[in-house]
Amino acid sequence: QLLHTGMVRRSNSALMSIYAASTGAASTVAAFQQNLLPQQVVQCSGRRRKSNNVRKPPFTLFGIDEWREASFIATGDAGEYGVMDMEDVNNREVCVLPFAYQDIVLQGQTKQVRLYEDRFIKLFEKCQEEHNGVLCMGLMTDTGGIVQTSALCEVEDYNRSKEFGIFATLRVMGRVKLTNLTQMEPFIVGQCTEFADDIPKSLDLPNMVADGIDNLLSEVSCLEVRLRQAQDYADEQRRKSNKSDDNASSEMKERIVKAALDDQFYVDSESNTSFSSRKSHYTEAYNDALACDTQGFVVSNKAVMGTTERSAKELTAISWAVFCSDDVKASDKVQALDCDKLFDRLKLAAHTLREKKNMINAKLAIAGLSSEVYGADEDEYEESEEA
């Protein structure tokens, strides 16, 4: 990060020298500053967005990397022996935007917000001017408290209107623990410390659990389609029976429904787009979590090219993607957010999918439909979970 700052400074100096050579201006810096573009493009974690406000040189960037670097700049003197106190560096100031407990979002996810109250508009302005567009999502409990572990968000895009306030898109880029609240009015400001996952030395067991997650995800997707088709077909038959004067027995009707469902599933499963709805949502969440992971990883064994072994970063993205589904309970999401061990969160994700599978199997059993076709054999996964 310090190297990145030096590169930015050198690039600015190079641009100034190029400008002086082309124009022959005596005061290079002043002339360069006066010839800024009306709308400067601001780089934000690999994504580009336009800012409506002209920034002052040296081309201030906005994002989590710049927010981290600001703590080094603010610390100033490194001390008598050239050693910087890391407690002062890691304990950073951040604005806390309150959210309901159920509105939690996780790594890589986005949140659309509208800020129209004066206090929240002031919070947003402080976030942009002093914290490089980074704020903290404060989850409010029923008792009025704030959950200590919070999602660290980056303002990815925003649009300001005098009549309707500020419309902003927030994206989760990391996690922090709130250590102290230094201001409560007119908005909340606190001190926070970033934390990252504890990665095991060997990734063999996490990869086994990840394999089990992939299998469970496919099974749950199949069962959800089967249950949805059963409900749709039952509703359709109920509407038809209300209009017809058929005197067939209810037992015969149930047999017809079951037989029709068995045939319909195998015919429509390949062409039905809803079959891949959970899988596609998981893939999208996985890609977002993978792209927005900025914590960095140092592990002893790297994934070998040409093998199916996943890296620590890929395993981390898998552990987040499972909890990004809308049907996951908020309490499970908060538990995943607070978990600081990669292996434990992977096991928690697998447990969440197993609960979902058991619940769908119970609904299918009530409807009199079997789920044996979709692989009730989970010996391989149970062995990895016991390990």
Image (cartoon, rainbow, N blue to C red):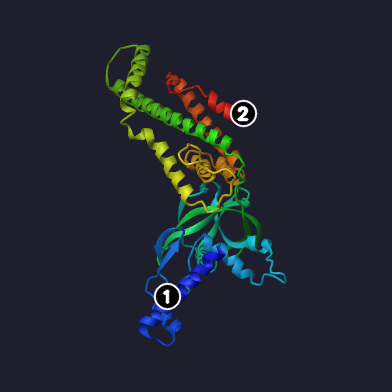
Kind of residue sitting beneath label 1? Leu
Q: Report helix, strand or loop for mark 1.
A: helix
| Residue drawn at point x = 45 percent, y = 48 percent | 288
Return the residue at label 1. 15
In the rendering, at what x and y percent does residue 329 appear?
53, 39
Disc 2: CA contacts within 10 A as few (<14), some (14-19) or many (>=20): few
In the rendering, at what x and y percent does residue 194 appear?
61, 55
Quadrant position of residue 372: top left
Q: Furthest residue to the right?
A: 80
Quadrant position of residue 38: bottom left
| Residue drawn at point x = 42 percent, y = 37 percent | 279
Asked whether residue 144 is in view, the answer is: no
Return the residue at label 2. 386
Q: Are marks 1 and 2 in contact (CB under 8 Å)?
A: no
In the rendering, at what x and y percent does residue 296 appear?
55, 52
Asked if 136 appears above or below 18 in the picture, the reply is above
Q: In which quarter of the image is the C terminus?
A: top right
Q: Furthest residue to the left?
A: 244
Disc 1: CA contacts within 10 A as few (<14), some (14-19) or many (>=20): some
Asked if 313 appears above or below 157 in the picture, the reply is above
| Residue drawn at point x = 69 percent, y = 66 percent | 83
Kind of residue sitting beneath label 2? Glu
As rendered, which of 319 and 181 lies closer to the eye? Answer: 319
Asked if 73 appears above or below 309 in the picture, the reply is below
Q: Quadrant of the N terminus?
A: bottom right
- 14 vs 340, left or right, is left
Q: Which of marks 1 and 2 is in front?
A: 1
